[in-house]
Image: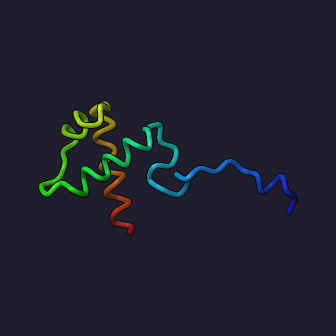
Amino acid sequence: MMPEQCREQFTVTVGTVFERSKIALNKWLLATFLMASSKKGMSAHQLHRRLGVTYKTAWFMPHRIREAMQKA
Protein backbone atom coordinates (compact mmCIF):
# COMPACT_ATOMS: atom_id res chain seq x y z
CA MET A 1 0.00 0.00 0.00
CA MET A 2 1.36 3.37 -1.00
CA PRO A 3 1.53 6.11 1.67
CA GLU A 4 -0.62 8.40 -0.50
CA GLN A 5 -3.53 5.94 -0.29
CA CYS A 6 -3.70 6.22 3.50
CA ARG A 7 -4.09 9.99 3.51
CA GLU A 8 -7.81 10.24 2.82
CA GLN A 9 -9.91 12.97 4.42
CA PHE A 10 -11.50 11.82 7.67
CA THR A 11 -13.73 13.49 10.26
CA VAL A 12 -15.22 12.28 13.52
CA THR A 13 -18.69 12.22 11.96
CA VAL A 14 -17.87 9.48 9.43
CA GLY A 15 -20.06 6.45 10.02
CA THR A 16 -22.55 8.31 12.23
CA VAL A 17 -25.94 9.93 11.67
CA PHE A 18 -24.11 13.26 11.48
CA GLU A 19 -22.15 12.25 8.37
CA ARG A 20 -22.57 14.51 5.32
CA SER A 21 -24.85 16.87 7.22
CA LYS A 22 -24.73 20.63 6.78
CA ILE A 23 -26.20 21.03 10.27
CA ALA A 24 -23.60 22.07 12.84
CA LEU A 25 -22.44 19.26 15.13
CA ASN A 26 -23.29 21.26 18.26
CA LYS A 27 -26.92 21.51 17.07
CA TRP A 28 -27.03 17.75 16.47
CA LEU A 29 -25.67 17.09 19.96
CA LEU A 30 -28.09 19.54 21.57
CA ALA A 31 -31.02 17.94 19.71
CA THR A 32 -29.90 14.49 20.86
CA PHE A 33 -29.61 15.71 24.45
CA LEU A 34 -33.01 17.42 24.36
CA MET A 35 -34.69 14.32 22.95
CA ALA A 36 -33.03 11.96 25.41
CA SER A 37 -33.67 14.10 28.48
CA SER A 38 -37.27 15.06 27.75
CA LYS A 39 -39.81 12.95 29.66
CA LYS A 40 -42.65 13.50 27.21
CA GLY A 41 -40.57 13.74 24.06
CA MET A 42 -39.61 16.69 21.93
CA SER A 43 -41.67 17.84 18.97
CA ALA A 44 -40.14 19.12 15.75
CA HIS A 45 -41.69 22.51 16.47
CA GLN A 46 -39.97 22.67 19.86
CA LEU A 47 -36.63 21.72 18.27
CA HIS A 48 -37.19 24.34 15.58
CA ARG A 49 -37.56 27.05 18.23
CA ARG A 50 -34.81 25.81 20.60
CA LEU A 51 -32.14 25.16 17.96
CA GLY A 52 -32.89 28.03 15.61
CA VAL A 53 -33.17 25.79 12.54
CA THR A 54 -35.92 25.55 9.95
CA TYR A 55 -38.95 23.39 10.71
CA LYS A 56 -37.97 21.04 7.90
CA THR A 57 -34.53 20.53 9.49
CA ALA A 58 -36.10 20.12 12.94
CA TRP A 59 -38.43 17.46 11.52
CA PHE A 60 -35.55 15.61 9.85
CA MET A 61 -33.16 15.53 12.83
CA PRO A 62 -35.28 13.41 15.23
CA HIS A 63 -35.88 10.86 12.48
CA ARG A 64 -32.15 10.37 12.05
CA ILE A 65 -31.54 10.34 15.80
CA ARG A 66 -34.29 7.77 16.42
CA GLU A 67 -32.91 5.61 13.62
CA ALA A 68 -29.47 5.68 15.27
CA MET A 69 -30.97 4.82 18.66
CA GLN A 70 -32.69 1.74 17.23
CA LYS A 71 -29.41 0.43 15.82
CA ALA A 72 -27.58 0.85 19.14
**Rendered image coloring scheme:** rainbow
Q: Is residue 26 above or below residue 69?
A: above
Whole-percent x, y for residue 65 in the image: 34, 54
Whole-percent x, y for residue 29 in the image: 37, 49
Whole-percent x, y for residue 19 in the image: 51, 49
Q: Residue furthest right?
A: 2
Tell me the quadrant of the picture where the N terminus can be found.
Answer: bottom right
Residue at 25 percent across and 35 percent down: it is 48
Near-viewer residue (26 or 54) = 26
Tell me the quadrant of the picture where the C terminus can be found.
Answer: bottom left
Instruction: Left or right? Give the position of 15 relative to 35.
Output: right
Instruction: Left or right? Give the position of 43 relative to 52.
Output: left
Residue 23 in which image quadrant = top left
Q: Residue furthest bottom?
A: 72
Residue at 24 percent across and 40 percent down: it is 47
Whole-percent x, y for residue 38 in the image: 18, 54
Residue at 29 percent across and 36 percent down: it is 51
Counting every numbered tag in the picture gives 0
